[in-house]
Image: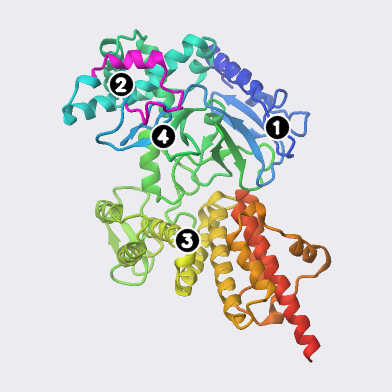
Amino acid sequence: MPEMDTDSVTKITNLQNYMKKLKTDTSDGTANVNDSNASVMGEDQQKMSTDSSDPIVISESPTMGRRVLAARDILPGEVILRDSSLFPLVPSQGKGVSCLGCLKSLPEEDFPYCTNCGAPLCDAQCDGRLHTELECTALAKAGLLILTDKELKAPLLKELKEALMVLRILHDLLQNPTKIHLLWALESNVHKRKLIPGSIDKEKQLVRFICDKLCVPVDEDLALHISGAYDTNSFNVPASKLHNGTGCALLPAGSMINHSCLPNSEYFYADATFYVRSTVFIPANSEIFINYSRALWGTRARRGSLLQSKLFLCKCQRCTDPTELKSHISSVQCGKCPGLIVPSMRDAEPWRCNTCNGTLSTAKADTIVKAVGQYIVKVPAGNIERLREASDLVGQHLGPQHFVAVELRHRLVQALMKNKEELTVKDLYQVLDLTKGLLQLADLIMPGKTFFRGHMLLQKVNAAAEILLRNHKEQHKADQQSPHVDIISQMVSTPNDQIDCNETSKIKENQTIPNEGQFHTQFDIQKLLEETKESQDILSNELGQSLEAMLMIEFFRRLIKQEHLAQAS
């Protein structure tokens, strides 16, 4: 077996030291990396840690590369890693203008700006600390303040946004020079980028901009490594709870986890901390995977995005299955029969119908999907009627199973439930139908305790609870003094932290929940309660807690009704 070179050993040692410095809070019983838990091993050192609480180990080998493995059996829902950005957040790359102080999204034209350098700044009193005096001095040399032509200012803003990736790291290294060792330990794929026509030339142009325009001396190799490290290792994360801005975080520990379109874990970002949590049971010695792409995209879209940003062609189980685990999320409706035209794994080969054997070229399929995609981009996210029309139209051309149609149905659920009190009962039943289909899809392409499942369960139970509430109020119109009506109404109008659940707790302690069949009702309340608890477990959502209490009150109401019926007879 070939040995790792000295440079690789140094890199993995630096990452190991970083992992050992990660702190943990194990008071909630979750498994996390702490001072003694993180370890690194080569393929010739596949030994389990003696501490049974260790969730992960890092494996490095010339053949398999750097991997994160389960050091023990990991249960669904365990937090297995915590990390924080190594350097200050930078604005997410791409379209849009962001405040450089707090990363809040700003209007693309006539945005407020820093009076010293002209860079976007949401307010003179912005409490964000990212836009430092050192940075302001450098950016002032770009000349934004003297530019009045919008057509000239736009490309300059784009260059400044890209330059900030390098600039903020350089400024941070002045204060924390020891971080340079960990920075060099991160993969940058510079050698791969040199093979892409124009890629390195563009990044060298950025280096010249920083040196010549901003007058900040920077080593070219270091700047290329920083730019590549961001492309390879960074994650877009919410910048604040107070606004919808996003930032780009460089996460040394989080970036060591490899990608799969059928992952066993997922990540989230809260309170400036990056978490990785298992979604399914992970046996010891299995590799930990997260999804770098979008689970609701089709294979060609996911692969294209990953190839462009991360420079690899995904060959996971889902990507190598033309049916995408029988979800057919990329297949299109056949125009000649009720069948589905299934994608080919090779561009040169036509797509083929699974019923009539009809064909469609890859180029034509891509053209159809692209045209439909351009249409739905123009559909307003909160316009329920437009979303319904678009969903029906896409279903006719691509089929209801296609990922574009799935995306529209997902958006429709969110739009409908934004103001559930204003929905008709028919609307609420549509939410139940939509969430049922989306949950069935999730079982195929993102199984386990995923956030998607948690949100869809929550929306489903929320819609069902609203229907139950309306039915209950309707049944008791003649008796406005019904304490149960008052309690249930209170559940809707009272803040979650003020809800009195004493009555519901008595049911948990003293009553046996009746079988739903006894009441011949439309909803399986016990199942809804279980789904609420599952959603609450996944999301830790206060709304889920209020719905659970509401459903328990519904149990209590039914028990009283049963007792009244028994007494009457």
Q: How far from the left and from the top, in percent, is residue 278?
A: 62, 43
How far is mark 1 from mark 4, CA to CA? 35 Å
Is residue 478 shown above or below 365? Answer: below
Residue under pointer 1: 25
Q: Amino acid at mark 1?
A: Asp
Q: Residues within 10 Å of mark 4 (few under 14, many from 20)?
A: few
Q: Is residue 540 left or right of residue 100?
A: right
Q: Amino acid at mark 2?
A: Thr
Is residue 474 shown above or below 160? Answer: below
Mark 1 or 4: the one toward you: 1
Q: What span is in magenta?
A: 120-143
Q: How far from the left and from the top, in percent, is residue 319?
A: 44, 47
Residue under pointer 4: 312
Q: Amino acid at mark 4?
A: Phe
Q: Secondary structure at mark 1?
A: loop
Mark 4 or 2: the one toward you: 2
Identity of the residue drawn at 70% across and 36% down: 31
Comes first in the chain, label 4 or label 2: 2
Identity of the residue drawn at 56% across and 19% down: 2
Residue under pointer 2: 115
Mark 1 or 2: the one toward you: 2
Comes first in the chain, label 1 or label 3: 1
